[in-house]
Image (cartoon, rainbow, N blue to C red):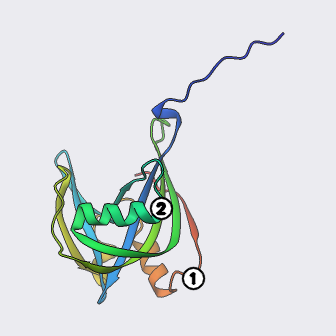
Amino acid sequence: MPRHRSRQKSARSIPTTRISVVVVENDKILLVKHRKGTSQYWVLPGGRLEYGETFFECAAREVKEETGLDVEVDKIVFISEAIAPDRTRHIVNVYVTARVTGGVMQLGDEDVLVAVDFQPLSELDRQTLYPPVARHVLDGIAGNFAEIKYLGNLWV
C-alpha cells in the first residue's frame, strides 16, 4: 500500500493576492509612495485581499486606508504574478480601475507609506513603479482597457 504524506498548507504554500487600483483623473494617476529600508518607490494604491472580501471591496477599502479617498470600482483590467526566483514569495496581482466619488486625499497611517499624490500620466514611464506596470497602464488607458490582460511574472 503506497504511503501518502499529509501536507498541511502553510502561509508559504498559498500565494498572496494583492489588489491594485488604477485611478485616473485629469491626465493624472493616483499613486502612493512606499518606503522599504532606504528605498522609496511608487505603487498603485491597493493591498492584500482579506478572506471573505471581494476584489472590489478590497480595492475600495485599500484606497480609503492609504489615500483617504472613496472610490467606485469599474472593472478588472490586468492580472500578473510576482514569483521570487527562489520561490519563497508568490503574489497574484489583480488590477482594477476605479473613479473617485468622495473623501479627502490624505496619507494613510501605515508605516510603509511616505506620500500620496496624483502624478501626471506623462511622467509615469519615468517613475520607479512597482510592479513595473507603467507601460501596461498607459497602453490600457489608450485602449480604454478593452480587455483583461495577463501580464506574466513581474518579479523585480
Q: Residue at x 46, y 33 (%)?
A: 11
Image coordinates of residue 155 in percent, x first then y, are: 44, 51
Image coordinates of residue 94 in percent, x first then y, are: 48, 61
Q: Residue at x 46, y 73 (%)?
A: 136
- Corner quadrant of residue 69: bottom left
Is residue 129 at least partly visible in the picture?
Answer: no
Relative to 43, say whether 90 is above or below: above
Q: Which residue is mark 1?
A: 146
Image quarter of the N terminus? top right
- Earlier-in-chain disc, 1 versus 2: 2
Q: Which residue is mark 2?
A: 55
What's the amino acid at mark 1?
Ala
The image's mark for residue 84 is none
Q: Extreme right residue here?
A: 1
Q: Extreme front residue here?
A: 52
Task: Identify which residue, 134 or 48, lies in the foreground.
Answer: 48
Image coordinates of residue 129 in percent, x first then y, are: 32, 64
How many other residues sit within 10 Å of disc 2, few (<14), some (14-19) or many (≥20)?
A: many
Residue at disc 2, secondary structure: helix
**Does residue 17 appear left or right of residue 71 in this picture?**
right
Relative to 37, say whether 132 is above or below: below
Is residue 12 at least partly visible in the picture?
Answer: yes
Q: Extreme bottom residue here?
A: 26
What's the amino acid at mark 2?
Phe
Residue at disc 1, secondary structure: loop
Relative to 108, say whether 88 is above or below: above
Q: Residue at x 23, y 56 (%)?
A: 34
Task: Identify which residue, 109 or 22, lies in the foreground.
Answer: 109
